[in-house]
Image (cartoon, grey):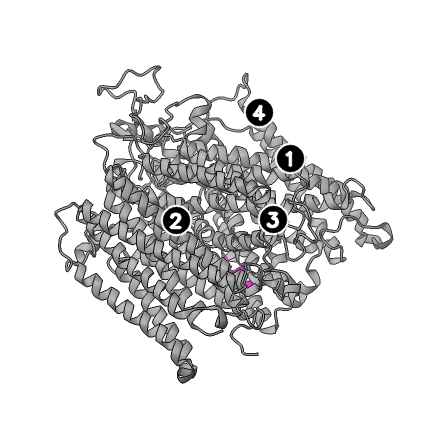
Amino acid sequence: MSTTAEHSDHTDVEHGHGHDDHAAHGEHGQHGQHGQHEEHGHKPTSYYVKVALFLGVLTALETATYWVVEELGAFLVPSLLIMMAIKFVVVASLFMHLKWDNKIFSWLFYSGLILAVLVYAAFLATFRFFTPT
Amino acid sequence: MAMWLFLGSECLLFGGLISTYMLYRGRHSAELGPDQIFDIPFTSVSSFVLLMSSLTMVLAVSAAAQKDDRRTNLWLTITALLGATFVGGQVYEFTVMYREGLGFTTSLFSSSFYTLTGFHGVHVTVGIIMLMALVGINKRSRVPGDKAEVVEMVGLYWHFVDVVWIIIFTLVYLIPA
Amino acid sequence: MAIIERPTDPAPVPAVAGSGAPAVVTPSQAYGVLRRPVSSTGWRSWVFTVDHKKLGIMYGVVAMFFFIMGGIEALLIRLQLAGPEGTVLSAGLYNEMFTMHATTMVFLFVMPMAAAFANYLIPLQIGARDVAFPRINAFGFWCFLAGGLFLNTSWFLGGAADGGWFMYQPNASPLYSPTNGVDFWALGLQITGIASLTGAINLIVTILNMRAPGMTLMKMPIFTWMILVVQFLLLFAMPVITVALFLLMFQRSFGATFFDVAAGADPLLWQHLFWIFGHPEVYIIVLPGFAIVSEVLPVFSRKPLFGYRFVVFSGAAIGFVGWGVWAHHMFASGLGPVSVAVFSVATMLIAIPTGVKIVNWTLTMWGGKIQFTTAMLFAVGLVVSFTIGGLSGVTHAVAPSDTQQTDTYYIVAHFHYTIFGGAVLGLFAGFYYWWPKAFGKLLNEKLGKWNFWLMMIGMNMTFGPMHIIGLQGQPRRMMNWTEARAGEGFFNLGFWNRVASVGSFILAIGVFLFLVNIWYTHRAKSNTPKAPLDPWDARTLEWITQSPPKEHNFDKVPTVHALDEFFHRKYEVDHETGEVRKVATAEEILAAEEAQGDKHIHLPSPSYWPIILAFALPVMAYGVIYNRLLIVVGGLIVLLAMFGWALEPSVADDSDYDPPAEGGGTNKELATIG
C-alpha cells in the first residue's frame, strides 16, 4: 500500500522483493513471465512434500521419546531441543522462504526471536530456573 | 516486511507466555500436573495435522504465485480445514482436562497452560478466518492489490503459528516437568 | 479516487472549485457497506483522513490535552504536599492522582507527542508522500484516542487506577484495590499499546522502504534515525507489556492467580514483565527528545552535527543495551547477588552511549555561531538537565547506593530530570523549531523566551529540591509529611517541599505561556506574518517544500546526494578561498523542484474503517469489566470492520495505478490486530 506509483520504483536496496536478490539465485525457474513479484523460491510441489515428510519424521521421533524417557536420561532434553530447533529453522527458511528472500527479513525476524530468547532466558535465570535446587 | 516485523514482535509475546508457563508449570496439586494430564499421543497427532497444514499453505502460496486460482482456493480450503481440525482437537483436549478437574483457576499450572495454549488457539482461529476470507474474496476476484502477495502474507502468518506450536509442543508437552 | 492534480498543470484537469484546493474526484463505489468519504475540508476531512500530516497534528492536539490533564494532576499532588498534613486530597484520591499523573504523562503525552512528530516529519524528512500504511496510521491514532478516553472514564466510574504506574502485584489485586480503576488501566493501556505497535510497524516500513532516491541509511537525517531506533524498541517492548496486562486482566476479571502469593505464585513475575517492557520504555520516551535536539543544535550552531556516525551508533547501542538493564528497577526485591551484579554493570555500561551523545552535542556547539532562539534554548536546556538526570542515574546503578535511594524522592528527582529534562524540553524545542513548517507562522520569540525561562526555573525549583528531600528519606507516594519529622536547618523537609510546590506552579505558568503563544500567533487579528520558507536556514529535506506542505508533500520527490541535503543545495565551498558561500535560496530550490513536478500523484483515499475499528475496542473493554455480552458486540464490530477494511482498496480504482510496492495486503492489517 505504498502511497504513490513512484515509490514502488524508488525503493532501494533494502526493499523486500529486491530484484537483484533473486536474480542471484537463478536456480528456481519460472521468473520472468509474471513480472518481478513472487517468483523467488517457489519450488515444485514434490520438494515441499519431501520437506514436510522430513518434518513429519522428526515429529514422530520427538513423540517417540515419550516412551523411552528413562533410557535417554540426560540426553532427552538436549535432543528434544535440537529437534525443535531444526524443525523451526526448516519451516522458517523453506516454508516461509526466508532462505530465498531478502536478508533483511531474516534479520528482522531473527532479531526479534533472538532478543526474546535472550531476554526471557535471563528472566528465568533470575528465578533460578536453570539451577537445580 | 510489515508481516515480518509483526512476527518479530509476536516472538516476544509468545516468549513471555511460554516463560510464564515454564515458571509455573511445577506449581500444581499432586494429581493434576502436566505429567498426569497430558495425552501425548493425541497431541502429537494434532501437532502433525498443524504441520501438514503448513505444507498445504505452501502449496497454496505456490499456486497463487502461478495465478492458478482454482488450486489456490483448493489448498487454502484444505489448510483452513486442517487448522480447524487442530482447533477442534484443542477444544476436545481442554474439555477432557476440564472434566478431569483442571479448570482455568485450579492452579498456577492450569492458568498459565490455558493462557498459553489458548492464545495460540486464538491465533490459529484468526488464521482460519483470514484463510476463509481469502477464499471468499478470491471467488469474487475482489482482492485489491496483488493477490499472490496477500496469500503470501497470510501464509507467513500461518507458518509462524505453526512454528510457535513446534516450540510449545516440545517445551510444554514433551519435556517432562 | 484521490488524484491530486497540480492546479498549475495545463493537463486536462477535472473542473476544480477554487484555485489552490486539490481536486477530489468522486470515488467509485467502494466495496463493502460504506461509500468512501471524500471531503477535503471540514470535520470529515479530519475524522476520516489518512494523511500523515493531519494525523500528526491530531496526535499533537490530543497529547497536549492529556499533558494539561496530567499537569493538573501533578499540581494537585504538589498542593497536597505544600504544607504538613495536607488535606487537599484524600489518601485514596492521592493514590489515584500519582498513578494517573504518571500513566497520563508517559502513555498519553510523551509517547503520542513523539508519535506526532514522527508522523508529521518522517515522510517529509525522507522525501515520501505518506507513510507506508496510511489507514493503519489512522487506526493507530484512533486507538490512542479511544484508549486514552477509556482510561480516563474511570474517574467517573468508581475511581481511577491507584496502584502506581507500575501497578505492582499483589498491591493492585482486587483485595487492595477494589475499584475497577486497575481494570480500566490494564485495558486502556492494551488499546493504546495497539496504537504503538501498529505505529511502530508502519514507521519502520516507511523508513526502510520509502526513502527518496539516493538517501542511503547513512544519509538519513538524525531525527529519522533515532525514531527508527525508538520504533524497534516499541516493536519489541509492547508485546511484553501486552502479556503482562493480559495476565493482570485474567487475574482481576477471570479469577486466575498469577500473582497471588497465597496460591504459590511469585509476584516478581509481574515486576519482571513490567520492567522488561519498562526499561526500553524509558528510552522510547527519551530518544525522541534526543532526536529533536540532534536536529536543532546543528541548525542554530551553524555547524553540522559532530560525529553523526557516533550519534547514530550510540543511539542503536542504547536501543540494544536498554534490553539488558531492566532488573535495576528491582535491586531491592532480593534478586540475589549474581543478578544484581550483572544488571548493575549493564546499567553502568549504558551510561557510555548516553555520554557519547552529550559529548557530541557539546562539540556541535563548540566554536559554532550559536543563535539563541527559543528552540535552541530548549535544546541547550535539555543537554544540561539531562546531564544532571543522567548523573543521578549512575548513582542508582551502584546497587548498594540504590538500596538507600529506592522509593524515596531522590528517584522522583532523577526521573523527572531525565523525562522532563530529556524528553519534554526536547518536545518543546521541536514545537518552536517546526511550528512554521506545520502551520506556516513563527511562534512569538519573546513569549517563547519567557516560556522557556519560566519552565526551566520552575523545573529546577520543583525537581532539584527533591534530591535533598529524597536523600533525607522522604518516601515517594506518601500522601503527607509531618512537621515533627521534617528535620532542621538546611535539610528541613518542609522548606524544600514548599519550594518544590512553588516551583511546580512556576512551571505550570511557563507551559501556559506556550498556549498563550499559540493563541497570540494564530488569533484572527494577529499581525504575525507568514513565515519565510526557510526561517532557520535549516539542513534537512522537510524544508525543501512549502510551509505548511501540500497534501502530497512534494511536487517532485527530491533526489538526495548528501547528508544534510538541503544545506548542500544552498551552500557550496569555494575551492579557491575555502569559504562556504550561499549559492541558492530556499525559494529558488523550491521553484526548481516544482517546475519538474509529477503530473499525476496518487494519494491514498480517506476511509471510515480505521475509526470504526478503533472505537470497537473500548466497547470490548467495557465488556470485560461490566458485561461479557458487550465483548461479543464489540468483537462483531471488529470483525465487520476488518472485512470492510480488507475489501476496500487503499487507493480507489484507477487504471494507471501500479500494484503497491510492499505487500499491498489487506490481510497484513488483519493480522496486525490478530
Q: Position of residue C22 (x, y in %)?
A: 34, 22
The crowd level at tag 2 (other Cα within 10 Å; few <14, some 14-19, many 20+) is some
Work out whether disc 1 and disc 2 sit on a shared chain.
no
Q: Are marks 4 and 1 on the same chain?
A: yes
Q: Measuring from the top left, give residue A36's x and y in whole percent.
A: 18, 47
Along the line of sight, the residue nearer the viewer: C206 or C617 = C617
Q: Which residue is mark 2?
A: B126
- Characterize the magenta stretch by its predominant secondary structure: helix
The span shown in magenta is C347-353
Determine the secondary structure under disc 3. helix
The amino acid pointed to by label 2 is Val
Viewer-proximal residue, C43 or C21? C43
Q: Which residue is mark 3?
A: C385
Quote the CA–CA distance across marks 3 and 1: 17 Å
Nearer to me, C626 or A43: C626
Judged from the image, the secondary structure of the residue bearing numbered disc 1 is helix
Nearer the viewer's eye, disc 4 or disc 3?
Answer: 4
For the N terminus of chain C, give its image quadrant.
top left
**How many numbered discs, if any?**
4
Say the numbered circle drawn on residue C510: 1
